Image (cartoon, grey):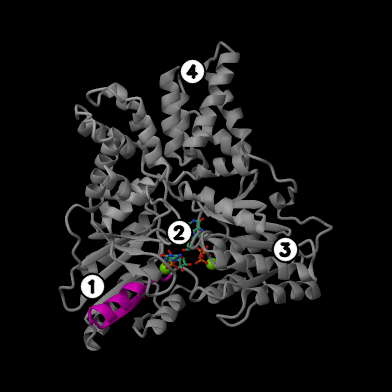
């Protein structure tokens, strides 16, 4: 939990040991939030909430202040409706459960898929991978290596073939193999490239030809070191694919990933997973209590 | 959000009409707007503060001449300061040494392998060089294959050793190979690594000390947020890199990390990478980057009006 501990340690420092909400506390808080990539709008929103609460509950002790800040921020993070992912089990009425993984270039989609496959398999599920990134050099090879590592089957075609056709094959194959969960990799694409975003839409439509209510989860992978642009990524990917959950990667570094607060708050998308390394074991379930708790762990 | 900083500045200055000079007091809103724009662009918050303070100092005491809108005056000061910061001395690229050795380093997924391919193509087609690409990432699944695919796309040889788990030895062997095969540039693609990963940071330092590169390029994703300052510092402390490569500029990020890095390590930004295809490599234009960070596509025309 090393990552989570330093996640917002700066925030803790900002308010720890203070007994009232004065301008200095708020300034420190502002700096700490900005420094964690929370962004100006969301930071101001948090500060406004704190000010309001502090006005209402007149006497604020250090402890109260920490709890207050904690609950205000926690309120900004939405829960997923379906919580099965927390134990890597699957909703009984959706079989095969189809997860479509999307995101901009190099954020960690393929690696996250390897980690998810490992965890779902570990919990006794039949996993199938679909290599629908047919564009980036050696993308299929990369996912193939992950499938071997985790020992799960993979559906693939040649490089350069139609990604929608791979997705279709994959879902079809999942149905006939009676897979429990299908995870489809897609090529990284910047959200401002219209034709590439349309391609995602096509992938989705083709999947629905086989399973009308699929994909059951569209997982947007965000790089934890990305700044405010992540917000635009979430908006654009949502508009073409109805993103239903988020994974934040690379939180084993010094980046804080605070922009996720803005995204979760503004767009009501739950964060499900965080990536904390390059090995298949390096995936954690995002827990907002823990996340915000770690925010307020007293640093001596 | 993008194009309205100039509007905001203009309106912030409306209430200044009739005042003779720019003062601390009447400039406060403007300074705040500029700082806000920088933060929205992911410029490090400390640097944003320092920068706006500097701009303020420059503007203070300036006479508000009737013919020049003070908003425009301010815009000009900001733009000039930023462009100077981003550019500074002219960036050179060393092709000395035989072979010239170029080491590529950076965080995971920043675009190192793709850039390595682009640089090889650029040196081959524009500089008449005969490059050798070196696959020194022994960790990422299919990293070696990825470089081989790119190499064959651009018709450049790739050195790799699938049996070896030692990037230092691979780099060394590659240089021997380059000499034997009359290659005059060696581009070493390394694995992505986090600045806090001691073992991996030591590894890349060892590669540097063994092969003595003419150029060490730090590859950064232009979408990077506040963490850019830590990463740039850590890589520079270990490698004393010679230049920076900004990637994924074909996106719509404002790219404030560029300013953060320039400010933090004062190393030139040597290339701008803007696409997945091998021919999407640009030289870096400080002026354009300054405008992009401020989100002011229209800034030039605005100043020209002044
Ligand atoms: N340190 C760290 N590295 C990660 C994490 N997740 C992924 N990576 C690394 O980030 C790099 C990019 O990961 P990929 O999984 O290839 O990313 P991608 O989104 O599939 O990339 P494209 O398909 O090229 O768009 C690789 O070097 C991964 O090992 C993480 O949680 N922590
Ligand atoms: N749109 C766009 N994509 C880019 C650019 N540069 C690299 N990419 C993409 O970003 C992803 C990661 O690029 P790589 O070259 O594999 O990154 P890397 O730094 O070598 O990654 P690791 O070796 O895993 O650390 C790939 O999908 C590339 O195609 C760029 O300038 N623009
Ligand atoms: Mg991938
Ligand atoms: Mg690479």
The answer to whether dots 3 and 2 both sit on one chain is no
The answer to whether dots 1 and 4 both sit on one chain is no
Which type of secondary structure does the marked residue at label 4 adopt? loop
Q: Position of residue A197 (x, y in %)?
A: 58, 64
* Horizontal side, residue B157 vs residue A277: left or right: left
Residue holding disc 1: B101
Q: CA distance from mark 1 to mark 3?
A: 47 Å
Question: Which residue appears at 84% of the width and 58% of the height?
Answer: A93
Q: Position of residue B17 (x, y in %)?
A: 31, 25
Residue holding disc 4: A21
Q: Earlier in the sequence, mark 4 or mark 3?
A: 4
Q: In the rendered picture of this protein, how many numbered marks are placed on residues?
A: 4
Q: Is mark 1 within 8 Å of ligand 4?
A: no
Q: Determine the chain carrying the residue at label 2.
A: B
Judge whether A242 appears above or below B80 on screen. below
Q: Determine the chain carrying the residue at label 3.
A: A
The answer to whether dots 4 and 3 both sit on one chain is yes
Nearest to the eye among marks 1 and 3: give it: 3
Farthest residue to the top: give it: A59
Q: In this rendering, does residue A296 appear at all?
A: no
Q: Are marks 1 and 3 in contact (CB under 8 Å)?
A: no
Foreground residue among B51 and B140: B51
Q: CA distance from mark 1 to mark 2?
A: 30 Å
Q: CA distance from mark 4 to mark 3?
A: 48 Å
Q: Position of residue A179 (x, y in %)?
A: 76, 69
Question: Which residue appears at 33% of the width and 76% of the height?
Answer: B134
Nearest to the eye among marks 1 and 2: give it: 2
Q: Is mark 2 within 8 Å of ligand 2?
A: yes
């Amino acid at each position: 939990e090393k990552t989570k501990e330093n996640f917002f340690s700066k925030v803790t420092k900002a308010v720890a040991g203070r007994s009232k909400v004065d301008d200095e506390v708020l300034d420190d808080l502002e700096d700490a939030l900005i420094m964690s990539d929370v962004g100006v709008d969301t930071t101001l929103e948090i500060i406004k909430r704190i000010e309001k609460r502090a006005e209402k509950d007149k006497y604020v002790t250090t402890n109260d202040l920490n709890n207050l800040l904690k609950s205000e921020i926690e309120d900004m993070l939405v829960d997923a409706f379906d919580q099965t992912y927390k134990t890597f089990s699957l909703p009984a009425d959706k079989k095969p459960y189809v997860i479509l993984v999307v995101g901009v270039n190099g954020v960690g989609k393929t690696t996250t898929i390897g980690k998810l496959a490992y965890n779902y398999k570990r919990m006794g599920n039949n996993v199938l991978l679909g290599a629908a990134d047919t564009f980036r050099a050696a993308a299929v090879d990369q996912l193939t290596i992950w499938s071997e590592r985790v020992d799960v089957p993979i559906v693939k075609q040649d490089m350069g073939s139609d990604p929608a056709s791979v997705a279709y094959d994959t879902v079809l194959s999942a149905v006939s193999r009676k897979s429990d969960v299908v995870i489809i990799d897609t090529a990284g694409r910047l959200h401002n490239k219209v034709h590439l975003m349309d391609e995602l839409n096509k992938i989705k439509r083709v999947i629905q030809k086989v399973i009308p209510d699929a994909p059951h989860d569209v997982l947007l992978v965000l790089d934890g070191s990305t700044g405010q642009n992540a917000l635009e990524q979430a908006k654009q990917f949502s508009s073409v694919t109805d993103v239903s959950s988020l994974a934040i990667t690379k939180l084993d570094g010094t980046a804080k990933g605070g922009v996720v607060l803005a995204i979760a708050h503004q767009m009501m998308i739950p964060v499900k997973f965080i990536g904390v390394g390059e090995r298949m074991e390096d995936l954690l379930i995002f827990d907002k209590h823990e996340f915000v708790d770690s925010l307020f762990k007293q640093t001596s | 959000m993008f194009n309205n900083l100039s509007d905001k500045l203009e309106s912030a200055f409306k209430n200044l009409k009739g005042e003779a000079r720019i003062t601390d007091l009447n400039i406060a809103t403007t300074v705040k707007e500029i700082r806000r724009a920088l933060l929205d662009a992911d410029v490090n918050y400390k640097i944003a503060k320092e920068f706006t303070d500097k701009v303020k100092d420059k503007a203070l005491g300036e006479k508000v001449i009737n013919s020049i809108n003070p908003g425009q005056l301010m815009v000009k000061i900001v733009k000039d300061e930023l462009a100077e910061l981003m550019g500074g001395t002219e960036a050179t690229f060393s092709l000395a040494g035989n072979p010239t050795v170029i080491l590529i380093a950076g965080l995971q997924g920043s675009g190192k392998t793709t850039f390595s391919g682009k640089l090889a193509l650029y040196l081959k087609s524009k500089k008449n060089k005969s490059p050798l690409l070196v696959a020194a990432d022994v960790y990422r699944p299919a990293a070696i294959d990825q470089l081989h695919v790119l190499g064959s796309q651009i018709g450049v040889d790739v050195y790799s050793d699938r049996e070896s788990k030692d990037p230092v030895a691979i780099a060394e062997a590659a240089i021997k190979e380059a000499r034997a095969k009359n290659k005059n540039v060696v581009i070493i693609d390394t694995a992505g690594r986090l600045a806090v990963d001691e073992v991996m940071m030591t590894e890349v330092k060892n590669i540097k000390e063994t092969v003595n590169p003419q150029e060490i390029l730090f590859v950064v994703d232009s979408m990077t947020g506040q963490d850019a300052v830590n990463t740039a510092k850590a890589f520079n402390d270990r490698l004393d890199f010679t230049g920076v490569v900004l990637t994924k500029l074909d996106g719509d990020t404002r790219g404030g990390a560029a300013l953060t890095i320039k400010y933090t390590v004062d190393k030139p930004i040597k290339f701008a990478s803007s696409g997945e295809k091998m021919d999407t490599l640009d030289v870096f234009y400080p002026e354009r980057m300054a405008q992009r960070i401020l989100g002011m596509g229209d800034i030039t025309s605005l100043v020209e009006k002044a």
